[in-house]
Image (cartoon, rainbow, N blue to C red):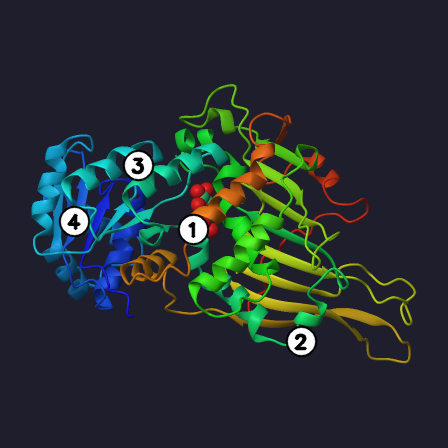
């Protein structure tokens, strides 16, 4: 049976940062693609008029990709604005009116999580939740109990198949490619296990700090901000078994099995760092113990992965901005040619941002009489010119009721169960210099003699 599409787009937090940076540009792109031929209603409590919201939308789009005048004109024509307190029933009455003939609205909650229960109840009491879908921004809770409580709050009003939890990493072209590459190639499967894989490293490095989000970040830290969601999702796609079908349910079932096989973190295998100067950021406590860097070792207790360490590292103010995965293969059993096989020459490398790169590292013979080798990379590199932004892709999918790229209740809770033991101040904070690769203590996370693979700027193709 065909899943009906939503027929109105409502976004709470219309005057906020996320709307400015991500939602308006995505709305223009969806409008240009003909996917948003419906009322578009922004809700916030800012004392604004609809004209002010339109100006804000134009400014946002101008700064994030550029205004397409034809599409923007349509978007502006459909845009309505409701100014009101989220706790006031009158706000939802006005929303109901604005929805008019629409029967299946999509409500996007781009608001602080503490407001979710109030808005969800407001939608329910006013009838605005009937036949509706709801899109929830991350962070989805701040630990396992709060995620469970949030799921319970949502389930009071929305069935699970109407809830779309956003993790924008899942909407990235490169992350989709990772999944595609794994299951569209026969050659990978025989080596994709503990018999051939030595270790997996994933580094999410950002060369900038908290960019004015100090107050938010100081409540979160790197483990909550990017490890529990983005990086565990990437690992799930790397390590899961093949789904039995291409429907979202089969995919989710395999991912869930994988999340559940992740061993809860051992705080002793987690190193937390904080860049020097973080405590001077606006909104950050002067004695903050929050980590802007985390390095850890994760174990996956399945027949495929038992004994293979998954090393994860994420940090702000590191030397480069990139996310990269290295799957290092075991060396050949005997070194027939070179006396010493250099490490890290047999591997798969997935660059997830800013470029999309998939490569495999190998050794080939150098020209000459000697049987000496050198490391080479066989590279597939994509630089799509008109790639969809993750938000365009994910909001479009949610409007069509396609849940494949969204996280469900069980997976989000399973991911928190992995991270929970390492939250808080169980382990001390190590200070590191901005522009460095983080605290020296992180070297102790990887097995002795191994070291971290530091992603380099990608060579530009001629
Ligand atoms: C967000 C985090 O979810 O992801 C940010 O809150 C982080 O701290 C961002 O910078 C990274 O996403 P992207 O798509 O810019 O790599």
Left/right placement of residue 42 relative to residue 414 reads left
Say if disc 1 is inside 8 Å of ligand 1.
no
Disc 3 crowd rating (10 Å Cα; few below 14, some 14-19, many 20+) is some
Mark 4 and mark 3 in contact? Answer it, CB < 8 Å: no
Quadrant in which the C terminus is drawn: bottom right
Between circles 3 and 2, the one closer to the viewer is 3
Q: Which label's residue is closer to the chain start, 3 or 2?
A: 3
Q: Which image quarter: residue 189?
A: bottom right
Q: Which label's residue is closer to the chain start, 1 or 2?
A: 2
Disc 2 crowd rating (10 Å Cα; few below 14, some 14-19, many 20+) is few
Residue bearing the label numbered 1: 408
| Secondary structure under the numbered disc 1 in the rendered image | loop
Left/right placement of residue 121 relative to residue 50 reads right
Q: Residue at x 58, y 45 (%)?
A: 319
Marks 4/2: CA–CA distance: 49 Å
* Percent coordinates x, y for residue 85 in the rendering: 17, 31
Residue bearing the label numbered 4: 41
Disc 1 crowd rating (10 Å Cα; few below 14, some 14-19, many 20+) is many
| Secondary structure under the numbered disc 4 in the rendered image | strand
Seen from the viewer's position, the closer of residues 314 and 456 is: 314
Between circles 1 and 2, the one closer to the viewer is 1
Q: Residue at x 21, y 46 (%)?
A: 129
* Percent coordinates x, y for residue 368 in the rendering: 86, 80
Residue bearing the label numbered 2: 187
Between circles 1 and 3, the one closer to the viewer is 1
Residue bearing the label numbered 3: 116
Seen from the viewer's position, the closer of residues 76 and 212 is: 76
């Amino acid at each position: 049976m065909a899943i009906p599409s939503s027929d109105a787009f409502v976004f709470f937090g219309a005057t906020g940062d996320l709307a400015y940076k991500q939602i308006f540009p995505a709305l223009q792109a969806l409008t240009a693609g003909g996917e948003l031929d419906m009322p578009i209603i922004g809700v916030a409590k800012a004392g604004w008029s609809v004209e002010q919201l339109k100006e804000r939308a134009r400014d946002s789009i101008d700064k994030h990709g550029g205004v397409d005048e034809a599409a923007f004109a349509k978007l502006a024509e459909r845009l309505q604005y409701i100014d009101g307190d989220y706790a006031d029933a009158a706000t939802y009455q006005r929303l109901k009116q604005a929805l008019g003939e629409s029967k299946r609205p999509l409500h996007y909650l781009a608001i602080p999580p503490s407001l979710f229960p109030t808005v969800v109840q407001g939608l329910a009491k006013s009838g605005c939740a009937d036949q509706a879908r709801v899109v929830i921004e991350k962070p989805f809770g701040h630990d396992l109990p709060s995620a469970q409580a949030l799921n319970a709050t949502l389930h009071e009003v929305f069935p699970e198949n109407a809830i779309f939890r956003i993790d924008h990493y899942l909407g990235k072209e490169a992350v989709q490619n990772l999944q595609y590459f794994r299951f569209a190639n026969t050659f990978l499967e025989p080596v994709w296990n503990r018999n051939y894989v030595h270790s997996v490293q994933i580094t999410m490095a950002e060369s900038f700090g908290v960019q004015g989000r100090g107050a938010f970040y100081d409540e979160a830290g790197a483990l909550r901000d990017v490890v529990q969601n983005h990086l565990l999702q990437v690992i799930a796609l790397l390590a899961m078994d093949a789904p039995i079908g291409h429907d979202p349910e089969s995919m989710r079932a395999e991912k869930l099995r994988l999340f559940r096989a992740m061993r809860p973190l051992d705080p002793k295998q987690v190193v937390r760092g904080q860049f020097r100067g973080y405590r001077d950021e606006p909104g950050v406590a002067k004695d903050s113990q929050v980590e802007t860097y985390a390095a850890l070792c994760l174990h996956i207790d399945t027949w495929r992965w038992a004994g293979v360490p998954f090393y994860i590292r994420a940090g702000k103010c590191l030397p480069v901005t990139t996310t990269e995965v290295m799957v290092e293969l075991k060396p050949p059993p005997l070194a027939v040619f070179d006396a010493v096989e250099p490490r890290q020459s047999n591997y798969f490398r997935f660059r997830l941002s800013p470029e999309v790169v998939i490569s495999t590292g190998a050794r080939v013979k150098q020209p000459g009489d000697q049987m000496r080798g050198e490391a080479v990379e066989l590279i597939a590199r994509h630089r799509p010119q008109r790639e969809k932004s993750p938000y365009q892709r994910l909001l479009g999918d949610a409007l069509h009721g396609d849940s494949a790229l969204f996280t469900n209740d069980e997976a989000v809770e399973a991911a928190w169960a992995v991270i929970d033991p390492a939250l808080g101040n169980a382990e001390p904070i190590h200070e590191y210099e901005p522009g460095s690769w983080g605290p020296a203590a992180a070297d102790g996370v990887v097995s002795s003699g191994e070291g971290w693979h530091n992603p380099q700027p990608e060579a530009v193709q001629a």
